[in-house]
């Protein structure tokens, strides 16, 4: 099955451990939350870079 879908056995067992016992709707909700979390982390990182750049500019004056 792993070869047919082009994934490694390690990936298969990791997914099995993570998603076993979940319904399809639960897995979809989890994926949505993970995507939102990823987006928010990216926004935070960009914001922190902006703050750092502004501090550098203010510090040079």
Image (cartoon, rainbow, N blue to C red):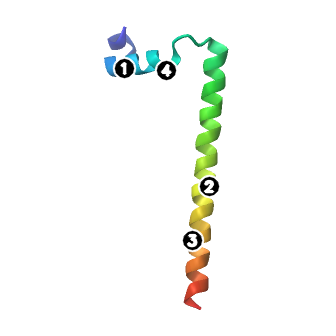
Q: Earlier in the sequence, mark 2 or mark 1?
A: 1
Residue 42, image x, y percentages: 58, 50
Q: Is residue 22 left or right of residue 14?
A: right
Say which element carries label 1: loop
Q: Viewer-nearest of labels 2 and 4?
A: 4
Q: Is residue 42 left or right of residue 25?
A: left
Q: Quadrant of residue 35?
A: top right
Which circle's residue, 3 or 4, is located before the other in the chain?
A: 4
Considering only vertical position in the picture, is 48 above or below 19? below
* Residue 52 badge: 3
Residue at 40 percent across and 14 percent down: it is: 5
Q: Secondary structure at mark 3?
A: helix
Q: Is residue 8 visible?
A: no
Q: Earlier in the sequence, mark 2 or mark 4?
A: 4
Residue 7: numbered disc: 1
Q: Residue furthest bottom?
A: 61
**Position in image of residue 56 (x %, y %):** 55, 80
Is residue 43 or residue 5 the one in the foreground?
43
* Residue located 59% across and 48% down the image: 41
In front: mark 3 or mark 4? 4
Question: Mark 4, residues whose alpha carbon is within 10 Å: few (<14), some, or many (≥20)?
Answer: few
Q: Is residue 40 above or below residue 52?
A: above
Residue where numbered disc 2 is placed: 44
Res 15 quadrant in image: top left
Helix, strand or loop status at disc 2:
helix
Name the front one of labels 4 and 1.
4
């Amino acid at each position: 099955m792993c070869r047919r879908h082009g994934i490694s056995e390690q990936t298969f067992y990791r997914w099995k451990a993570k998603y076993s016992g979940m319904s399809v709707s639960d897995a979809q909700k989890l994926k949505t939350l993970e995507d939102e979390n990823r987006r928010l982390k990216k926004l935070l990182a960009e914001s922190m870079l902006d703050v750092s750049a502004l501090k550098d500019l203010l510090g040079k004056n």
